[in-house]
Amino acid sequence: TNFARRSLTGVVGLATAGAAVHHLTSENRKVFAQSQFPTAASASESSWWPFSKKERTIMILFGPPGAGKGTHAPNIVERCGTPQLSTGDMLRAAVAAGTEVGKKAKDLMAAGALVTDDVVIGIIRDEIKKPDCSKGFILDGFPRTVGQAKALDEMLGNEKVNCVIALQVPDEVLEERICGRWIHKESGRSYHATFKGLQPKSLPAGAKPTKDNMKDDATGQPLMQRPDDTADALKKRMASYHGETTPVLNHYGGIVHIVKADQATSAVWAEIAAVLAKVGK
């Protein structure tokens, strides 16, 4: 079964073996994932998925920006036969559909206020009642705080989160991955200053990347870096991520599985697949 990946968020991890995926569109990431890990796409859910059919698979996927969630999440979706839920996507859909919680969210946003946890939980509650979540779902980027985790636990009632996968990458590796990224604003084409195969033709070998020598291969127009892709911005983002995530992982305790995500893409997937097999025993 081909389950559409709902999440529009997440940065494609530039792990060694999977660096080229950064050039792909979000629609084609699954094609890339299937070419890299054919067993993930070919294994049927009925013959492979280890969780009991009597309980829904409720999984949380954690990972800092640049850890590779965008690369591996489609594979997990294919193997589990359950959709990946992004709170951002669900929020926008609820607002567009004019649901009760969507209206509350719209009012909060119109007032310039943050969407409250109870509204987010309400959106998740509505979403997981849909038919495609009948076998379970994968939460991406939620919960971010212990308070949200406790609210999620309460909302699930007799059900519970039964697997947490955390992609772990040293901050210095993330800095190289993220701070080396440059984009062509008009087309969205992505490049990297140091990763071979992703460097623009305009960058001389061994040269330091600048606005003058980082240009789009197709148009020759200057490339740019996103404001969040600077070293200073990344340090703030990582401090926030660690501060929020560590207590949440502690909250879930024994169902948390740390995956070493600073290795070749195929090796990372092997660890994830091993976790999925282990938790199903």
Image: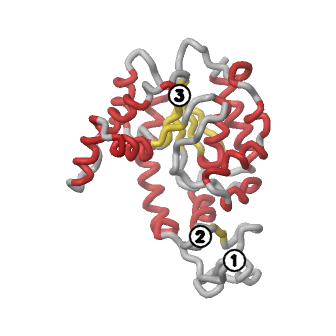
Q: In x, y percent, where is residue 256?
A: 55, 31
> Residue 258's image quarter?
top right
Numbered disc 1: secondary structure: loop
As drawn, 157 above or below 66:
above
Quick one: quadrant of the N terminus?
A: top right
Q: Residue at x 78, y 45 (%)?
A: 35
Residue lying farthest to the left in this orientation: 111
Q: Compute the Cα span from label 1 to label 2.
A: 10 Å
Mark 2 burial class by Cα count in 10 Å: few <14, some 14-19, many 20+: few
> Tag 3: residue type?
Asp
Q: Which badge, 3 or 1, is on the more N-terminal residue?
A: 3
Between 213 and 267, the residue placed more toward the observer is: 213
Numbered disc 3: secondary structure: helix
Q: Which mark is residue 132?
A: 3
* Snapshot colouring: secondary structure
Q: Which mark is residue 187?
A: 2
> Is 250 on the left or on the right of 42, as rendered?
left
Residue lying farthest to the top in this orientation: 54
Between 95 and 239, the residue placed more toward the observer is: 95
Q: Residue at x 66, y 69 (%)?
A: 192
As drawn, 90 above or below 227:
above
Mark 1 burial class by Cα count in 10 Å: few <14, some 14-19, many 20+: few
